[in-house]
Image (spheres, rainbow, N blue to C red):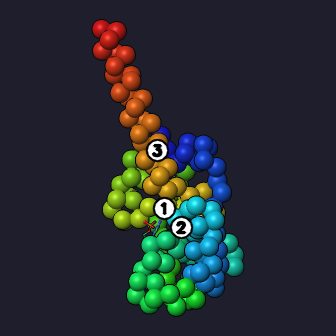
Amino acid sequence: MNVAAILKLKGRAVATARSDVTLLEIARRLAAKKIGAIVVIDEAGGVAGIVSERDIIRAVGHGGGGALTTTVAEVMTRNVITCRESTTLDELMATMTAGRFRHVPVLENDQLAGIVSIGDVVKHHVAEVEMEASAMRSYLTAG
Ligand code: AMP
């Protein structure tokens, strides 16, 4: 199982925003779309950063409710770890675990081609494990 297979099932839509948007607006978009992170893009459409619900909580935790008027540029993570469509599920799990983040944008030819969340990873991992267990049961009962 790789990222291409995950995207085939979930689609390639990626929520994006520019870096001058306020955290309040980001919170509204995250809530409306029921997602946990938004990819920040520059004028050319390239990836400039990523902002997740955790960045908003951190900003509010440190600065109070007033922090919601600050811009994404002030809190986003600029060094975004991305993956390719050929990245495997195991590689993705290792990347998320090592980096302690739950979202990985997919880049193909420097263009955003989708995003994978920890929810997608867990869902497909569980399906894979169940398939293996079922194949093992069939093998054992056939013997
Ligand atoms: P998350 O677990 O995705 O809510 O993100 C936790 C922290 O990691 C936040 O500060 C995010 O800005 C950051 N983050 C999320 N995804 C990535 C990524 N793919 N590469 C680098 N940092 C990330």
Q: Is residue 87 above or below residue 102?
A: above
Of 124 and 65, the residue lying toward us: 65
- Looking at the image, tell me whether mark 3 or mark 1 is earlier in sequence order: 1
Q: Which mark is residue 103?
A: 1
Asked if ligand 1 lies within 8 A of label 1, the reply is: yes
Horizontally, is 117 left or right of 91 in the view?
A: right
Tag 3 or tag 2, which sits nearer the N-term?
2
Label 3 Cα neighbours within 10 Å, binned few <14 / some 14-19 / many ≥20: few
Q: CA distance from mark 3 to mark 1?
A: 14 Å
Q: Position of residue 118 (x, y in %)?
A: 45, 55
Q: Is label 2 or label 1 in front?
A: 2
Residue 85 lies, with reference to residue 36, above or below; the image says above
Quadrant in which residue 94 is drawn? bottom left
- Left or right: 128, with 98 as reference point: right
For the point 37% across and 16% down, the residue is 138
Q: Quadrant of ligand 1?
A: bottom left
Q: Are marks 2 and 1 in contact (CB under 8 Å)?
A: yes
Q: Quadrant of the C terminus?
A: top left
Alpha carbon of mark 2 to alpha carbon of mark 3: how far?
Answer: 18 Å
Which residue occupies 62% across, 73% down? 28
Q: Is residue 108 visible?
A: no
Mark 2 close to ligand 1, CB under 8 Å: yes
Q: Which residue is mark 3?
A: 123
Residue nearest the viewer, comparing 112 with 133: 133
The amino acid pointed to by label 2 is Ala
Residue 75 x, y percent position in the rendering: 49, 83
Please give the residue where the numbered disc 2 appears in the rendered image.
37
